[in-house]
Image (cartoon, coloured by chain):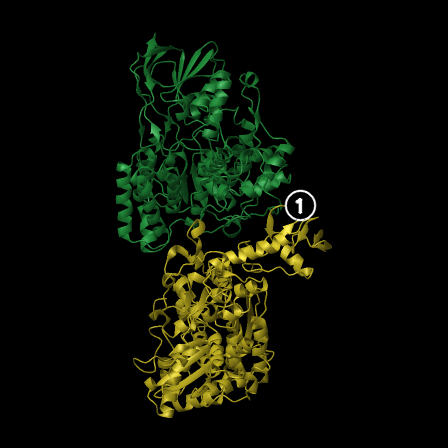
Chain colours: A yellow, B green
């Protein structure tokens, strides 16, 4: 312990405690912008400056530590003035088009400017650059809003290990750019969107496609189109946050009600196709297990498009190890434009399939050249919106969530089991698959709450979670990993022969889809664990806990697909990962 | 009313003079990762302020050039603008009335041709090619990339053994470098901006002189791979140390009686006492490296080819031990010896008695200084350095020249040797042609030309040639190793393209350079040989680096090391330089700006494993 003073009051803190943490422990707030716990302690923005008694120089609180006798002053005129000037300087290089900015309500720069009472933007000459950026990718960078906090650089390098962003240029021209000066299309970017959710401003954003839905010429306003909307599992865990509502009120059924209110013709649930994914992927896994020598191991899940792109870019020799099963989003689209189109007697091209995803990479997944199988020349999924975009639509339509009664999703693609909803959290796909594999191999259902609990990786402090099961005499070695940094560690361990598994679930975002790049943004707060809790509550509350018990999925096989991994399934629900360039 | 007045400095001029002096430091600091166009634009503005404003090309033209450069920097320029810059600069260079305008324009022209790619990249792609490589300038400048702020801080805390451990992580010859490193790190030290660079080598010396014993590092599990190192100089010792640490078995083949290469056969003991060198070598060999001394590769069956067959990889680091010839009459007569032979004898502890003899040393590099200062210690009646250029053109370090002069060495500059006068088969005098300083070729180095005066005769008994060394190509006469300009053609990653499994580095690739460059090459080779053999051993760094002290950046002068009095030291081969006291070292370490923490070092630096 070392003895320090903050604003004259004595405190004792652990040695090497940062000034920022010491102040927080003492209940004294110091504003921050560039600081990210454990990831970005670089003293760049200079908004957290403090005074050290006896020194002329001011110091950043984030990257300097307390030593014996240090006397820190956080509220002197000098400190306040320095913080405010630095903020004004940052604002001089920031295009303040706040009303039209996607991050208007969640912009940390705007919030701090208000907190520090910055009222004159003309203090310094405006000095920002506008640079062109491709709209063909889901990750959009706006140079004119970047405040060079390098949080994106840290997140991408340290958490995702993709090193897409870097400091570029020199001297006062320094900014953030794609590392190696490539176009983002040519970079290592897998479009996970973690840089976006960790950007304090609107400099990084996910491409907004909501105009395609609600614009004057959007599909909702086109009477010739039948609109089908699907909602991914993780969306229901977080959408209420955008309205300050608790998960217990902002439920999936209230979400369904809102979507009905918005006027979508069919409000369906991606949980349906998550169950379908388990039927296909589980069957594929058991098939591979029965023909072990024909395959390379382990088999990897394929639901996460960020992960699929990561593997294709970084370890292309391993892409055959991906399950050929499409993701729930794409399975949903393929079934919508075949089975469902037939059922309602509408041509596939007259149906617009919209997905709401916690994800930015899904926008790129639906563009994969060989992903569409329902009808030649027709996209299986037309538009993918993020959770944030959906909430924005509700705001545009002035939906009063508080006044909504809960409603059911529509039939037949609106039914999901507890096994499906847990796709939203890390470990969920693995657990759902194991529940059904267990049933297939033993003829009995396992205990949904207990048997495979060990693969629930949410909140784990290990790089990945592993578990070994004996299912009817067959040993299944499973591993679950989330975030691409941990994924890289796991893959390197596999390649070095230090780890060996049969089945590995990978989710690109920390915590899985609940922590996805399309989810609501909270500055310096990670909500994935809380959202996972909501997801598991949905599982427990569902009377159906096993994908193979989803009655609508059973009907789909009976009436249309015939059997999992059958001919029609192969055509509609599986894909060649090697058939496109990442 | 007075007719004339004395020119005196007013307040503004005095302050400005001070600012100019400070800007001098920026020129010296000169980080390598800045945008060259940005720098050009800044310098152009400086020229503009100095324009007298009379003539059109300078007053208006430079201003227009400046606008165009800004356009490039703002990514708003086109290739037509680049043509315009070039055309306008050429115009100003030939049409301005005085040197201010024409020199400014020439500076811009140099850039337009010299780093045209940068211009094109800014214009076409909107991107600057400058890479952020110097976040921690001293580390970036050190060929071995030692964690310098780390060990400086450790010395400041009196943790000397930890400081040496941290050095050894990147350089297994810490004592050698504490004494003779040319410290390129200091030339890049950011502290230069305030007052003067940190005395980094002095602090390393402090750690070496005061450390407790350091336990040997633990070897990685044996890989069963065998590596031959040809040449046991600094580069060979370095590669051997790290490869052995990684679990491979290394054997060093050394032509001479002792390991050390130029460290022992080139550097006199008064600069590098043998016990320091031996300490480093013992620590390296302590890992279990095998040695074959007195074994020359290239003779008989012991060829590179055969070694390649017997070993999984071969590293060639034979140095540059062959003396260059002066190419003058009488050069081969008795009494004319090469620096290599002379210093080599001293290295093997053979005393060379120069008592009562007049010694001439030809050359102006560090080796010439080593020879001259050694000759004084060998009892020479007089020692004179003969050099064809001026003192300021000498490549030797200034402190070496000063040291030599203090010990009584005479400098005869601007004299080019033309003939050795031989009497009874022995050298009796050197004839030299008086030179004058001539034109500066390429704007860098002066070319001496004869003054027209008569050649002079310099009486002597011994002439030591110290005009340069090259690699001995004999070992490679019948090998597949490609040579170019008398040196081995190896890549920057020490591989030889046409010869997988054979690596090379150090002086035999670069020509005579510094110990730390050879060490750096050895480190690069160790990593790449490990990778070549299919491994990826990580050298971990376990020393905890002290946290920064939060203090104001006060100006404080640099502490230099002192030397023994010339009259005393000229009589022996004992170490000349005297290490710092604890108080000196503490103040000096406290001057470090901790670029590993402040500036971009905290983002881009702090690398701890390789």
> Is A199 left or right of A16, judged from the image as shown?
left
Q: Residue furthest right?
A: A10
As rendered, which of B200 and A436 lies closer to the eye? B200
In percent of width and height, residue A373 lies at 34, 80
Residue at the top extreme of this rendering: B424
Chain label for disc 1: A
Label 1: which residue? A54
* Residue B58 as seen in the image, left or right of residue B398: left
Q: Position of residue A142 (x, y in %)?
A: 42, 63
* Rendered location of residue A508, percent (x, y): 48, 68
B301 over A120 or under it: above or below: above
Tell me how many marks there are.
Answer: 1
Asked which secondary structure carries label 1, the reply is loop
In the rendered view, tell whether residue B434 sits above or below residue B583.
above
Question: In terms of depth relative to the viewer, which is nearer, B469 or B568?
Answer: B568
Q: Farthest residue to the front: give it.
A: B1
**Residue nearer the viewer, B221 or B402:** B402
The correct choice, above or below, for B277 with respect to B520 in the image is: above
Is residue B217 among what the camera can see? yes
B560 sits to left or right of A16: left
Instruction: State the image coordinates of residue B186 (x, y, percent, origin top left).
Output: 50, 36
Disc 1 residue crowd, few under 14, some 14–19, many 20+, Cα 10 Å: few
Question: Splitting the image into 4 quarters, where does residue A144 fall?
Answer: bottom left
Q: Residue at x 36, y 76 (%)?
A: A371
Residue B486 visible at all? no
Task: Give the vertical position of B570 relative to A44 (above or below).
Answer: above
């Amino acid at each position: 312990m070392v003895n320090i003073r903050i604003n004259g009051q004595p405190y004792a803190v652990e040695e090497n405690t940062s000034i920022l943490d010491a102040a927080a422990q003492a209940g004294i707030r110091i504003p921050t912008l560039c600081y990210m716990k454990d990831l970005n302690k670089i003293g760049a923005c200079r908004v957290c400056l403090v005074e050290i008694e006896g020194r002329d120089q001011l110091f950043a609180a984030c990257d300097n530590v307390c030593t014996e006798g240090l006397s820190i002053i956080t509220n002197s005129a000098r400190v306040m003035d320095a913080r405010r000037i630095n903020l004004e300087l940052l604002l001089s290089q920031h295009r303040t088009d706040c009303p039209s900015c996607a991050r208007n309500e969640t912009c940390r720069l705007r919030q701090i400017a208000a907190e520090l009472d910055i009222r004159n933007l003309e203090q310094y000459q405006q000095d920002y650059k506008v640079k062109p950026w491709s709209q063909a990718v889901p990750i959009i960078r706006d140079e004119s809003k970047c405040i060079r906090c390098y949080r994106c650089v840290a997140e991408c390098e340290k958490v995702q290990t993709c090193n897409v962003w870097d400091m570029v240029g020199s001297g006062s021209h320094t900014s953030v750019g794609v590392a190696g000066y490539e176009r983002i299309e040519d970079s290592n970017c897998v479009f996970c969107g973690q840089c976006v959710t960790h950007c304090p401003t609107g400099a990084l954003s996910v491409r907004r496609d909501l105009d395609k839905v609600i614009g004057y010429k959007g599909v909702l306003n086109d009477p010739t189109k039948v609109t089908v909307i699907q909602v991914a599992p993780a969306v229901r865990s977080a959408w209420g946050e955008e309205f300050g509502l608790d998960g217990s009120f902002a439920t999936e059924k209230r979400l369904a009600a809102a979507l009905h209110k918005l006027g979508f013709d069919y409000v369906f649930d991606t949980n349906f196709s998550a169950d379908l994914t388990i039927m296909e992927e589980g069957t594929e896994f058991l098939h591979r297990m029965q023909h072990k020598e024909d395959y390379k191991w382990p088999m990897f899940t394929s639901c996460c498009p960020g992960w699929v792109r990561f593997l294709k870019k970084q370890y292309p020799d391993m892409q055959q190890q991906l399950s050929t099963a499409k993701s729930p989003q794409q399975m949903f689209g393929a079934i919508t434009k075949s089975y469902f189109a037939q059922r309602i007697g509408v041509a596939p091209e007259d149906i617009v399939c919209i997905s709401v995803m916690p994800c930015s990479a899904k926008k790129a997944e639906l563009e994969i050249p060989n992903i569409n199988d329902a009808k030649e020349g027709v996209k299986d999924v037309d538009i993918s919106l993020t959770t944030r975009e959906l909430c924005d639509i509700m705001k545009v339509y002035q939906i009063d969530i508080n006044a909504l009664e809960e409603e059911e999703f529509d039939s037949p693609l609106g039914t999901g089991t507890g096994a499906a909803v847990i796709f939203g959290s890390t470990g969920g796909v693995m657990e759902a698959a194991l529940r059904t594999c267990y049933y297939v191999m033993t003829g009995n259902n396992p205990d949904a709450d207990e048997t495979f609990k060990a693969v629930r990786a949410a909140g784990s402090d290990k790089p990945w979670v592993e578990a070994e099961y004996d299912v009817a005499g067959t040993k299944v070695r499973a591993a679950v990993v989330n975030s691409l940094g941990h994924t890289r560690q796991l893959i390197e361990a596999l390649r070095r022969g230090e780890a060996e598994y049969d089945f590995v679930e990978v989710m690109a975002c920390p915590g899985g889809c609940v922590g996805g790049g399309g989810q609501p943004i909270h500055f310096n707060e990670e909500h994935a664990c809380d959202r996972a809790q909501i997801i598991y509550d949905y599982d427990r509350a569902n009377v159906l806990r096993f994908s193979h018990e989803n009655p609508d999925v059973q009907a789909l096989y009976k009436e249309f697909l015939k059997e999992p991994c059958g001919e029609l399934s192969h055509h509609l629900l599986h894909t060649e990962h090697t058939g496109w360039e990442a | 009313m007075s007719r004339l007045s004395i020119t005196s400095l007013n307040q503004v001029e005095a302050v400005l003079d001070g600012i100019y002096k400070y800007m001098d430091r920026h020129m010296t600091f000169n980080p390598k990762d800045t945008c060259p166009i940005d720098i050009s634009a800044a310098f152009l503005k400086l020229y503009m302020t100095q324009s007298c404003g009379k003539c059109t090309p300078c007053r208006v033209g430079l201003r227009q050039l400046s606008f165009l450069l800004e356009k490039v920097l703002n990514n708003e320029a086109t290739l037509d603008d680049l043509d315009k810059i070039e055309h306008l600069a050429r115009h100003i260079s030939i049409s301005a009335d005085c040197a201010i305008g024409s020199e400014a324009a020439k500076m811009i022209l140099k850039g337009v041709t010299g780093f045209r790619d940068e211009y094109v990249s800014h214009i076409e792609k909107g991107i600057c090619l400058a890479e952020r490589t110097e976040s921690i300038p001293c580390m970036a400048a050190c060929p071995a990339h030692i964690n310098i702020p780390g060990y400086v801080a450790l010395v400041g805390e009196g943790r000397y053994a930890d400081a040496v451990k941290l050095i050894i992580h990147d350089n297994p010859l810490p004592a050698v470098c504490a004494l003779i490193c040319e410290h390129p790190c200091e030339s890049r030290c950011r502290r230069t901006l305030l007052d003067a660079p940190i005395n980094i080598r002095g602090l390393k010396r402090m750690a070496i002189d005061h450390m407790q014993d350091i336990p040997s590092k633990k070897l990685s599990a044996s890989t069963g791979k065998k590596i031959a190192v040809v040449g046991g100089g600094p580069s060979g010792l370095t590669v051997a140390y790290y490869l052995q640490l990684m679990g491979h078995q290394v054997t060093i083949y050394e032509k001479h009686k002792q390991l050390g290469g130029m460290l022992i056969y080139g550097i006199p003991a008064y600069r590098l006492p043998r016990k320091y060198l031996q300490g480093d070598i013992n620590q390296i060999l302590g890992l279990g490296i095998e040695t074959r001394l007195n074994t020359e590769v290239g003779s008989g069956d012991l060829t590179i080819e055969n070694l390649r067959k017997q070993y999984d990889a071969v590293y060639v680091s034979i140095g540059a031990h062959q003396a260059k010839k002066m190419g003058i009459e009488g050069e081969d007569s008795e009494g004319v010896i090469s620096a290599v032979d002379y210093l080599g004898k001293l290295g093997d502890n053979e005393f060379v008695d120069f008592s009562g003899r007049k010694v001439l040393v030809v050359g102006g590099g560090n080796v010439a200084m080593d020879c001259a200062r050694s000759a004084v210690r060998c009892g020479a009646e007089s020692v004179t350095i003969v050099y064809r250029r001026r003192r300021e053109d000498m490549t030797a370090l200034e402190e070496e020249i000063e040291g030599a002069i203090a010990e009584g060495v005479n400098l005869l500059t601007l004299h080019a040797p033309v003939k050795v006068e031989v009497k009874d088969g022995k050298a009796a005098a050197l004839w030299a042609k008086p030179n004058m300083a001539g034109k500066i070729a390429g704007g860098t180095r002066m070319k001496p030309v004869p003054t027209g005066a008569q050649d002079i005769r310099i009486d002597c008994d011994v002439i030591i040639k110290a005009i340069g060394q090259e690699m001995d190509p004999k070992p490679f006469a019948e090998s597949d190793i490609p040579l170019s300009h008398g040196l081995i053609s190896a890549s920057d990653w020490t591989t030889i393209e046409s010869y997988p499994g054979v690596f090379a580095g150090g002086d035999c690739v670069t020509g005579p350079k510094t110990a730390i460059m050879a060490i750096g090459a050895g480190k690069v080779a160790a990593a790449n040989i490990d990778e070549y053999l299919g491994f990826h051993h990580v050298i971990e760094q376990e020393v905890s680096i002290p946290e920064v002290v939060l203090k104001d950046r006060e100006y404080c002068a640099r502490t230099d090391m002192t030397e023994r009095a010339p009259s005393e030291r000229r009589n022996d081969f004992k170490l000349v330089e005297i290490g710092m006291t604890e108080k000196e070292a503490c103040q000096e370490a406290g001057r470090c700006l901790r670029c590993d923490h402040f500036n971009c070092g905290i983002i881009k630096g702090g690398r701890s494993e390789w």
